[in-house]
Amino acid sequence: MDASSPTGSPAGTPAGSPGPAPASAAEGLRFAFGTLTVLPVRVARWDRAAARAGMVCAPAVGLVVGGLAAAAGAALLLCGASALLAGVASTAVPAVLTRGLHLDGLADVADGLGSGKPADAALRVMKQSDIGPFGVVTLVFVLLAQVAALAELYARGWAAGAAGAVAAALAARGALALAARRGVPAARPEGLGAAVAETVPRAAALTAAGCCAVLAAGGAWPVGRTAAAAAAAGTVLGLCAAELLLRHCVRRFGGVTGDVFGGVAEAAASCTLVVAVLL
């Protein structure tokens, strides 16, 4: 799942030459929506500065994707569908809007980690087009967990389910910002992982993650203070789970790839939903 840019990975800046001009907020949003969703947004600028701005703007993508997922689930529930069907819809929408790349990345990471091979060989396993047994099992259980958690939230009411869908999408994009922070190298010199790796300053990555928790709490506020606190706590713990997976992948593979970005996003979303159900 290591997707490449239309024009190749951004080239590094030669020593002694000025870096690219800072990207505007509009350019960052275009990069974020153009690379992280199927929405028809043209990425006019593809360099390290645009990647930095795009990853910082990832929470905005989470808000839109989560909002659409919540709308689908809530609409079905209000039309008389079961909580289970609403949960399926809210799980399917993010997969469709991301071309399934995050799920594909999670499966590839599971195959790479499960292979038990050295870093170079594990990376080759991850780059294969097919999905192995570790990937299949991981996908099945992760999707089941997401559907089950959302179904339980929708059983409490359409607003609770919608808040869970938004929080999960926000946590997933906050995890992407954290995975792109400085100090987390790329495992390969090509692909989307290399394009965005180490582009985001640590402070900006933490700020983006914090914005995700605040937005998740705001989305759950109409349900009640307890739901808002649960959404914020779930988002934070989801980001912690993603960080654990990220660090393990960096140790095993030597850095991040596009697959790792997808894997940490799904880990964050799943953990966020489970915590929201338990709190």
Image (spheres, rainbow, N blue to C red):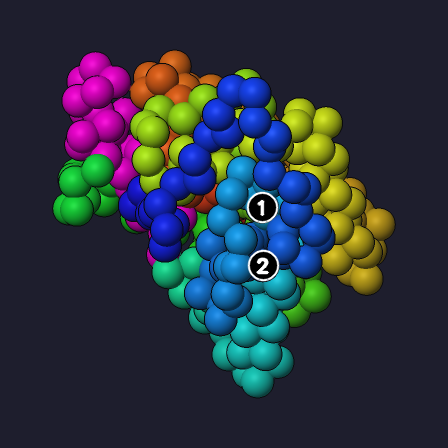
Name the residue carrying label 1. 50
**Secondary-structure class at tag 1:** helix
Where residue 200 sits, quadrant-wise, is: top right
Relative to 162, 142 lies left or right: left
Front residue of 238/25: it is 25
What kind of residue is marked 1? Ala
Give the crowd class for mark 2: few <14, some 14-19, many >=20 residues within 10 Å: many
Relative to 99, 34 lies left or right: right
Residue 24 x, y percent position in the rendering:
70, 51
Q: Earlier in the sequence, mark 2 or mark 1?
A: 2
How many marks can you see?
2
Q: CA distance from mark 2 to mark 1?
A: 9 Å
The answer to whether marks 2 and 1 mark residues whose Cβ atoms lie closer than 8 Å is yes
Does residue 158 lie above or below 232 as drawn? below
Name the residue carrying label 2. 30
Relative to 194, 122 lies left or right: left
Q: Residue at x 84, y 50 (%)?
A: 225
What kind of residue is marked 2? Arg
Does residue 220 lie above or below 205 as drawn? below
User: Which stretch appears magenta?
Assistant: 100-126
Front residue of 178/83: it is 178
Quadrant including the N terminus: top left
Residue 159 x, y percent position in the rendering:
70, 66
Give the prevailing secondary structure in the magenta stretch. Answer: helix
